[in-house]
Amino acid sequence: MHTWIRTASGALFDPYVPRACDVNICDIAHALSNICRFAGHTRRFYSVAQHSVNVSLRCSDPRYGLLHDASEAYLDDIRAPLKRSEVFAGYRALERGVQSAVYERFGLDIALEPHDLHSADEQECASEMSALMPNVDLPNDPRQHEIVPLSPLEAQRLFLERFLVLFPAYKLSRADELVFPIRRPSWDETWMQMARTVSQRSYDPRLRVGAVIVAADNTTLLSLGYNGNYSQGPNVPDSMIPGGSGFIHAELNALLKLDFHSHHRKIMYVTHSPCVACAKCTVNAGISEVVYESEYRDAAGVALLRDAGVQVRRFMLT
């Protein structure tokens, strides 16, 4: 029985006899971008590729940070408690061999991994657990940062772009570009990603919401907003009780900035479905369609919009 695996590029790689010449950075980027951290037990998909890019930003030698989990492209990811057990001693040996081959392929040496690689990995893991895992209560650490999960395609592209910066001598061939073509995001993806980005402006520690209003023909961004206080007001909520923050909701902030003399048919993209009050304002503002990603705790706002003749649909970024 053979021991090789076939990779995304169509090449063969034998993890039992790993050779540097068989390592392909596009195979690594493709595989890591499709492997979810924490064995998939996250609120949203979050790839090993994106994790690797972030570790490279913390590590003293970012080249090792980017490639530290590259062996998983050929062996898959194993949760740490299993990997450390005696039963998985054979896996650890394979992992070290594959990792050595990856490093060798790009002029690195496993014996020269920087001393802070493990701590950089652990710090990044803490940020990910706080943002993505349920029932995790870690102490505040200034080294933690916001996690905005990317789709596999976005993570793959980010990983390759970071690789080209850190390894300028390596160039992607035309064949590599054909194997992994660049896909243009749809308008739904574009506007919802913008709503997500806008939501990061919010100071609400419990729930950040973003909204953008666009022309239905996708030619014009008409307005945007996020949940926050009145202009020049304190950037702290009145209360941490759900519904008691005192902040103006994202939808209303976007509507307040809207030019009501515009004759465009208008679509609102919002990260969370509107509450009843925002739904009423949305109807009166003449919004013809509302697209949301996550459901608000109360679905009555969606029901009100539909009863008023506003088209409502859910669109989730992958």
Image (tube, grey):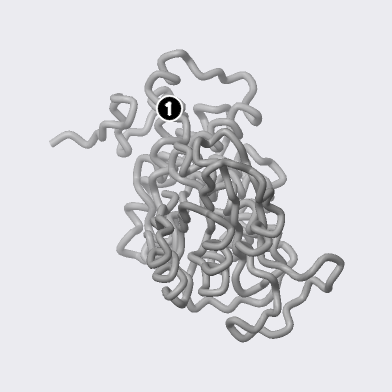
Percent from the top left, x then y, of residue 232?
86, 67
In the picture as drawn, the residue positioned furthest to the right comes out as: 232
Q: Residue 181 appears in which quarter of the rendering?
A: top left
Secondary structure under badge 1?
loop
Q: Is residue 111 visible?
A: no
- Rendered position, 276 above or below 145: below
Q: Is residue 3 visible?
A: yes
62 and 91: which one is in front?
62
Percent from the top left, x then y, of residue 248?
69, 70
Provide the residue designation for mark 1: 24
Q: Residue 106 appears in which quarter of the rendering?
A: top right
Q: Residue at x 64, y 22 (%)?
A: 168
Q: Residue at x 41, y 53 (%)?
A: 315
Left or right, residue 258 beside residue 263: right
Left or right, residue 22 beside residue 230: left
Number of dots carrying numbers: 1
238 and 305: which one is in front?
305
Packing grade of label 1 (10 A; few <14, some 14-19, many >=20) is some
105 and 225: which one is in front?
225
Residue flagged by tag 1: what amino acid is it? Asn
Q: Residue at x 35, y 40 (%)?
A: 74
Left or right, residue 6 beside residue 57: left
In the picture as drawn, the residue positioned furthest to the left comes out as: 1
Percent from the top left, x then y, of residue 16?
30, 38
Percent from the top left, x then y, of residue 265?
52, 44
Which quadrant of the figure contains the N terminus? top left
Q: Residue at x 68, y 61 (%)?
A: 253
